């Protein structure tokens, strides 16, 4: 009989972690949560060793990160410890145990100066500390192990919401629709919003096919501004709101963000492995699952 394949999910209670657990339900899944549950703290090598001790895994999926972009500017050393050194620690433990690593990185490794989708061959140049820590993670992982898949994604939303932000962008817009008279959303940051469920399915495909190790862009298809994304959310849910397009500079945030961070899934496409839908369809799927899609669109 075939041995059941196994996967360790680090950050299993996070937004992506939640969907990974569903998508890998027929595999042996070891779910590891960070502080405060403390199955694992990726800043601590001993804690990783202990968590991996009695486990065999075909893949380790590291979703763990400190994802609060503005806060990363305030607690720079902490963000570096989790996002960069933590990723390095996981990569080292994977090499020692002979596990393949899937690590999640970000579109924020780019500066947004390009006007066409970034491929895996484009040079990164992060604008903010979060992006810097994610890029450092990529560099450190590649020094530690040859058996890695670094998946860069963007604008994630999923059923579990983003833990540090408390809710994802879609849910936030739907809450605003109930609470606010006038909703202002930036129209000059262009990206590809990505469903964490679809990303989890993409990760599963990679685990099944085991392509060459390397960096892979993995987002839904197409592109939009946050304003256009919000507009589509309200259209699909039938919410009547006053939605105003504003510019990045109109918001008081001190954090620089790329104005254009669309990624092309070139390395997946070349290998015929891209399973990601257009972002409109992925959003529809998400809203339908939540029972929020307008009846006539079902
Ligand atoms: N959200 C986005 O828009 C976005 C965009 C591009 C890339 N990404 C990347 O995608 C990945 C998943 O994001 P997400 O939205 O699922 O984030 P999330 O909901 O905030 O989940 C992050 C997870 O990291 C865990 N964690 C934090 N510090 C840890 C530590 N020291 N040790 C162990 N676990 C720790 C948290 O576990 P506990 O809460 O249990 O501590 C949480 O489960 C991240 O690597 C992120 O950088 C996200």
Image (cartoon, grey):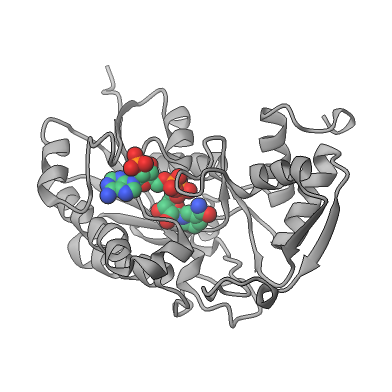
- Image coords of residue 263 (percent x, y): 57, 65
Residue nearest the viewer, comparing 227 with 91: 227
Give the number of marks.
Answer: 0
Quarter holding the N terminus is top left
Residue found 75% across the figure and 31% down from its top? 292
Quarter holding the C terminus is top right
Residue nearest the viewer, comparing 124 with 209: 124
Residue found 30% across the figure and 24% down from its top? 4
Quadrant in the rendering for residue 78: bottom left
Asked if residue 131 shows in the view, the reply is: yes
Direction bottom: furthest residue: 113
Report the side of 184 relative to 78 (left or right): right
Report the side of 103 relative to 223 (left or right): left
- Image coords of residue 47 (percent x, y): 14, 43
Residue found 60% across the figure and 81% down from its top? 114
Direction top: furthest residue: 1
Report the side of 267 relative to 34 (left or right): right
- Image coords of residue 279 (percent x, y): 69, 51
Asked if residue 271 shows in the view, the reply is: no
Residue found 45% across the figure and 76% down from its top? 126
Vertical arrangement, residue 237 with respect to residue 156, above or below: above
- Image coords of residue 244 (percent x, y): 82, 62
Report the side of 255 relative to 292 (left or right): left
Vertical arrangement, residue 135 with respect to residue 37, above or below: below
């Amino acid at each position: 009989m075939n041995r059941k394949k196994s996967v360790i999910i680090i950050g299993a209670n996070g937004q992506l972690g939640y969907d990974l657990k569903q998508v890998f339900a027929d595999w042996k899944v070891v779910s590891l949560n960070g502080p405060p549950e403390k199955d694992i703290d990726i800043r601590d090598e001993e804690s990783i060793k202990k968590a991996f001790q009695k486990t065999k895994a075909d893949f380790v999926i590291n979703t763990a990160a400190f994802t609060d972009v503005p806060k990363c500017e305030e607690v720079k050393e902490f963000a570096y410890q989790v996002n960069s050194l933590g990723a390095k620690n996981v990569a080292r433990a994977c090499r020692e145990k002979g596990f393949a690593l899937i690590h999640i990185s970000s579109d924020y490794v780019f500066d947004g100066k390009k006007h066409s989708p970034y491929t895996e061959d484009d040079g990164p140049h992060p604008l903010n500390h979060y992006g810097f820590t994610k890029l450092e993670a990529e560099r450190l992982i590649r020094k530690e192990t040859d058996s890695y898949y670094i998946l860069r994604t963007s604008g994630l939303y999923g059923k579990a919401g983003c833990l540090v932000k408390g809710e994802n962008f879609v849910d936030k817009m739907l809450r605003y629709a109930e609470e606010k008279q006038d909703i202002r959303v930036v129209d000059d940051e262009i990206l590809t919003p990505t469903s964490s469920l679809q990303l989890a399915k993409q990760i599963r495909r990679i685990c099944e096919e085991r392509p060459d190790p390397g960096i892979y862009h993995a987002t839904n298809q197409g592109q939009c501004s946050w304003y256009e994304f919000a507009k589509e959310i309200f259209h699909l849910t039938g919410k009547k709101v006053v939605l105003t397009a504003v510019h990045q500079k109109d918001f008081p945030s001190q954090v620089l963000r790329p104005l254009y961070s669309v990624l092309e899934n070139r390395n997946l496409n070349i290998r015929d492995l891209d399973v990601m839908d257009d972002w409109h369809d992925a959003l529809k799927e998400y809203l339908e699952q939540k029972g929020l899609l307008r009846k006539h669109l079902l």
